[in-house]
Image: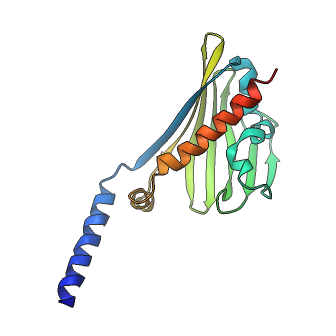
């Protein structure tokens, strides 16, 4: 009886691991919001990391987060190194491309709680008297992340943070 239970458990574990191996080896999370402000007004709120951190939901998750800015104050080369609680982790973000007023691309390098190297993109598209701002992140999805994805809705968790951040950005950008 115990031998049968052990064999079933091993088979179930093997099936789970095989299924995780078939999942995509890349991921993409994306959310958008319509903001009643011009792209010219919104772009600096993303392109200057000190202004970015006034509405960034991750900066708000840990009021005791330690951080330091490096490089120029805005645009390519501007960087921010951070270390926070378990919700924030430890890592750095750096602007690698900026095309005013339509796009800012960043490189996010996480050290903790899990190592990861991802691309973060903000696109700003004029829509009449408003701007559609899209916040996306994409990168490699190693096996451990694919396995965790079977138990946790990573798109939902990260997407909820992006939605909160876009709401914060909207509040800041729509102020007179």
Please state, as top left, top right, bottom left or bottom right, where the C terminus lies in the image: top right
Residue occupying image coordinates x 48% and y 46%? 155
Residue occupying image coordinates x 55% and y 55%? 116
37 up-or-down from 63: above or below: above
* Residue 8, image quadrant: bottom left
Image location of residue 169, percent across then percent down: 70, 32
Left or right, 120 with reference to 22: right
Q: Nearer the viewer, residue 80 or 46?
A: 46
Image location of residue 36, percent across then percent down: 68, 19
* Residue 53, image quadrant: top right
Please state, as top left, top right, bottom left or bottom right, where the N terminus lies in the image: bottom left
Left or right, 164 with reference to 23: right
33 up-or-down from 12: above or below: above
54 up-or-down from 170: above or below: below
Image location of residue 26, percent across then percent down: 42, 47
Residue occupying image coordinates x 25% and y 66%? 15
59 up-or-down from 73: above or below: below
């Amino acid at each position: 009886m115990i031998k049968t239970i052990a064999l079933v458990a091993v088979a179930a574990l093997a099936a789970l691991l095989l299924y995780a191996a078939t999942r995509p080896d890349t991921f993409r999370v994306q959310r958008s919001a319509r903001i009643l402000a011009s792209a010219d007004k919104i772009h600096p709120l993303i392109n200057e990391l000190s202004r970015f951190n006034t509405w960034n939901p991750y900066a708000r998750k840990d009021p005791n987060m330690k951080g330091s800015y490096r490089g120029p104050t805005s645009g390519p080369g501007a960087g921010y190194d951070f270390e926070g609680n378990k919700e924030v982790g430890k890592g750095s973000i750096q602007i690698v491309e900026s095309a005013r007023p339509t796009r800012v691309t960043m490189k996010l390098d996480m050290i903790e709680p899990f190592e990861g190297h991802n691309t973060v993109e903000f696109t700003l598209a004029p829509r009449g008297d408003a701007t559609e701002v899209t916040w996306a992140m994409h990168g490699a999805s190693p096996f451990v992340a694919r396995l965790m994805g079977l138990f946790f809705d990573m798109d939902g968790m990260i997407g909820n943070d992006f939605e909160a951040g876009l709401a914060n950005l909207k509040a800041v950008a729509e102020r007179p």
